[in-house]
Image: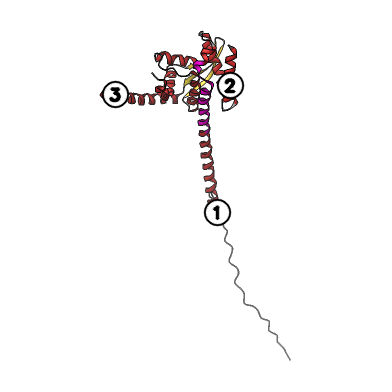
Amino acid sequence: MPRDSFSGHLELVLLASLGREPMHGYALIEHMREASGGHLDYPEGTIYPALRRLEDQGFVRSRWSDSDGRRRRVYSLTPRGVRSLESHRSEWDRYVGSVRAILGHG
Amino acid sequence: MADSRERYLASLSDMLAGSRRDRRRLREELEAHLNDARERGLGDDEALARIGSAADVAAAWNARCARRRAQQHVRAVSVAAVAAAACLLGIVQYARGAPSGPSQPPQRTIPHPPPPAPQPRQVGVLRFYP
């Protein structure tokens, strides 16, 4: 699956992943790769600017966390992020339903 | 191996826009990311390849910075416009003589007593007696 097919949905995928549990960047990337069966394989360095964009918009918050002697930045959804995720999920479902209906009739 | 990592991070730092604090945070996150990759058995070169070129990461980062600057600019212009409108309103009210603050209660005036009626002037009459 070409990576560009999903490039516009990175923020939705990040919100949905963080909706499961707070995660640091590397764990987020691993989760997205595994949950998508390897289809979502973004350049890992672009995840961090995307997370900062979500943070700028108030959808995500982050803090440094020390565990096992390692310092990592952990991201979690804000209440606003939860609402945005719900809204985007509904939009996505409608979009997929529409495209599927068209493809099914094609 | 550590050299390629340091070279990458130095090259990326040179291309990043934004505040020093923000840039340091991104660098620290990428270092933590590379440490996680190393812990999972990936070599630095492979981990760097997965991160993507420094130019691509910087482009994504700088786009975010530009967007943030634009938002801050719009916010500043909006605040300035509201302040200017408030000043203009104050000037207009001042020019019309209408005080913008709470109106003062009318001052109580004590009526002055009416001026005394003019008395007919006594004209002296000179009388001459023989």
The amino acid pointed to by label 2 is: Ser
The amino acid pointed to by label 3 is: Leu
Q: Main secondary structure of the magenta part?
A: helix
Neighbours of disc 2 within 10 Å: few (<14), some (14-19), many (20+): some
Q: Do the numbered discs 2 and 3 sit on residues whose CB atoms are within 8 Å?
A: no
* Residue at which label 1 appears: B95
Q: Is residue A41 above or below residue A8?
A: above
* Residue at which label 3 appears: A103
The residue under the point 53% across, 19% down is A63
Camera-side mark, 3 or 1: 3
Q: Nearer the viewer, residue B59 or A82?
A: B59
Mark 3 lies on a secondary structure that is helix
Q: Is residue B59 above or below residue B96?
A: above
Q: Position of residue A92 (x, y in %)?
A: 36, 24
Q: Chain of mark 3?
A: A
Q: Chain of mark 2?
A: B
The residue under the point 59% across, 24% down is B14
- State the separation of the CA atoms marked 3 and 1: 69 Å
Whether residue B104 is visible to the viewer of this picture, yes or no, is no
Residue under disc 2 on the same chain as residue under disc 3: no
Q: Position of residue A44 (x, y in %)?
A: 48, 18
Which contiguous range is marked in magenta? B49-69
Mark 2 lies on a secondary structure that is helix
Residue B11: mark: 2
Q: Position of residue B20 (x, y in %)?
A: 60, 25
**Image quarter in which the N terminus of chain A is found:** top left
Camera-side mark, 1 or 2: 2
- The disc, 1 or 2, on the residue closer to the chain's N-terminal end is 2
Residue under disc 3 on the same chain as residue under disc 1: no
